[in-house]
Image (tube, rainbow, N blue to C red):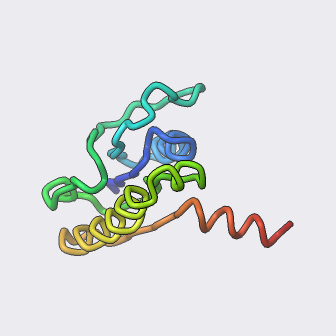
Amino acid sequence: MRVLVTGHHGYIGAVLVRMLTAAGYEVVGLDSDFFVQNRFLGEVVEAPSLIKDLRDIELEDLRGINAVLHLAALSNDPLGDLDAHLTYEINYHGSMRLARLAKQAGVARFCFRHPAACMALRARKC
């Protein structure tokens, strides 16, 4: 199974790529590399990568992909407050566009994990 992991150079994405590769999945990464200078340390598994903004993904980028694990987002409140419009463009419009293109490309599975949802779940447990 060929899996696209968006945000594959991020905190969760880097770990997920390692786990998927170890489990035998063919992984393709998508990352804008906004934070390339702040890569996370540890064992990094290289995967074929699309280095582009989530908002610039094209239908052809999704051809042959069986599943999308969508992790890419601007993910914290200070960053969102810095440029709320940009955060909305990437986190909402970019994600919706990716989902539509994935459906159009025939991607069978689409999993979206948004950082705010994870923080809200954590807050309720406290």
Of 12 and 89, which appears nearest the observer? 89
Quadrant where the image shows the N terminus: bottom left
The reply, left or right, for residue 2 in relation to residue 122 is left
Return the x and y of residue 23 as percentages of the image width and height.
Answer: 50, 47
The reply, left or right, for residue 72 in relation to residue 118 is left
Q: Which residue is drawn at 36% across and 43% down?
A: 31
Return the x and y of residue 19 as percentages of the image width and height.
Answer: 54, 44
Q: Which residue is drawn at 56% across and 46% down?
A: 12
* Quarter holding residue 96: bottom left
Of 45 and 75, which appears nearest the observer? 75
Return the x and y of residue 114 as percentages of the image width and height.
Answer: 53, 63
Quadrant where the image shows the C terminus: bottom right
Position above or below: 31 against 87? above
The reply, left or right, for residue 81 in relation to residue 102 is right
Position above or below: 124 against 77? below
Q: Which residue is drawn at 39% across and 68% down?
A: 92
Q: Which residue is drawn at 19% across and 73% down?
A: 104
* Quarter holding residue 105: bottom left
Of 56 and 8, which appears nearest the observer? 56
* Quarter holding residue 115: bottom right
